[in-house]
Amino acid sequence: MKKWKSKTAVVVMFVTLMLGTAGCGSVKMTTDKNSQTEETTESSSVKMLSSSDVIGKSTNDKLETIENLINKNFYFEDDEQAKQDGIIKGYLEGLDDPYSVYYTQEEYASFMEDTDGEYVGVGVQVSQDADTKTITVVKVFDGPAKEAGIEADDIITEVNGEDISGQDIDTVVDKIRGVAETEVTITVYRSADGEDHEFTMQRRKVENPTVEYKMLADNIGYIEISSFYEVTAQQYIAAVEDLNAQGMEGLIVDLRGNGGGLLDVAVDMLDYMLPAGKIVYTEDKDGNVTSEYNSTDEEQFTKPLAILVNGYSASASEIFAGAIKDYGIGTLVGTNTFGKGIVQRIFPLDDGSAIKLTIAKYFTPNGNDIHKVGIKPDIEVELDVDAYKESEGEKDNQLQAAVDNILEKLGKKTAAEKTESGEAGE
């Protein structure tokens, strides 16, 4: 078996989505589990909200009463800007949409830093359940978190002693990240032993891979994609071409734990894989088609293909998996995907802050609405978690099911068939 080959990109600690540009004149849509991304050159002038036509008189009177009570009775020193930011955050929370949020100037600057591909953190990829707000570690990269002992599936409960229950994932990520060589303490709940674990580690610059690949036995290529970021399409195509040069006969693309990323990146990758036709399209609240993305007939992947997915495969991952399934050029293996089929757009504001709003739904080529439904795999296989962890990832029954699917398409014997016939296997 070939050793891992990796193309690396600096990735955020799985905050919503990468943005490519800054400033009030540029807008991007986002598609990961917490947000999907399409760049537009549309000029956007965002009108600042005015209390005279937004905040009702009764609400304004109540705020004044509360302010007086704070001034007379609050023991600690208050932060006026933090209170104002809190009002706006609450206003967005009133939409009852976990994907529509307000970013303070500092939070938005941090978000834009993610776009640049550099951040100082601990090296974990996290995901947030839209209903419970629970934040779960999806993957641990080489870095402080891995060295400290944080594991995939750990549930983050506290950061520096503060209970983060119900907080937006962007806010929690911002608390975990910080200045290089400063310490952060993360408390997690680990269902494997039913215990809380506290880890203190030193922040540092972390570079996380978005594409890793290798050649498995029987000339089956394997590519794992952790996120869809600026460099991912280029790295993915290079990986496929390298595997082809090595004699690849079939390909497995692993999207498990991939919460999404940039829409245009997923589209570029699908354009490389699909025949000419529709890739994905979006509709606004009135049912109008707002965007449509199509593949050309310049390239098409024609070898046996399997896509690994699970409940953490979301948004851009679902766009990728959904298109592959609709065109029938590959087999989906694993468990039902997350089900995030809505699009957000970032609107930068004049003071350096920004809001993110849900503005559309996206649909697969066949017109499937996967929001809160997800995509059902063609071959359903629950991961044997105990075997996977005990073998440190060597025993992966979902991957084996994908391998067997490719072998069957190639007319070769599966691992089980080789064992039954007494043939040696790897």
Image: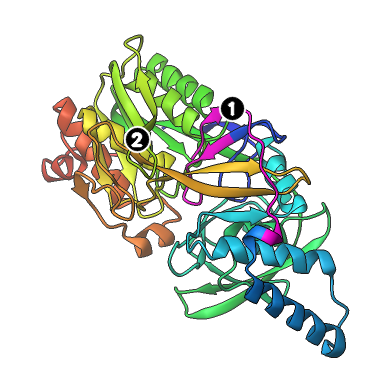
Q: The C terminus is located in which quarter?
A: top left
Indicate the secondary structure of the residue bearing disc 2: loop
Q: Residue at x 50, y 67 (%)?
A: 133
Inspect the magenta stretch and tell me whether residue 50 lies in it.
Answer: yes
| Magenta span dominant secondary structure | loop
- Given residues 242 and 258, the one toward you in this image is 258
Residue position marked by numbered label 1 in the rendering: 42
N-terminal label among 2 and 1 = 1
Q: x, y percentage for residue 123?
A: 64, 51
Residue type at the position of mark 1: Glu
- Given residues 60 and 394, the one toward you in this image is 60
Label 1: few (<14), some or many (≥20) within 10 Å? few
Residue position marked by numbered label 2 in the rendering: 288
Q: The N terminus is located in which quarter?
A: top left
Quadrant assignment, res 350: top right
Q: x, y percentage for residue 384?
A: 31, 60
Inspect the magenta stretch and tell me whether residue 226 lies in it.
Answer: no
Does residue 21 lie above or below 131 as drawn?
Answer: above
Query: What range of the chain is rendered magenta?
Result: 28-52
Does residue 88 lie above or below 414 as drawn?
Answer: below
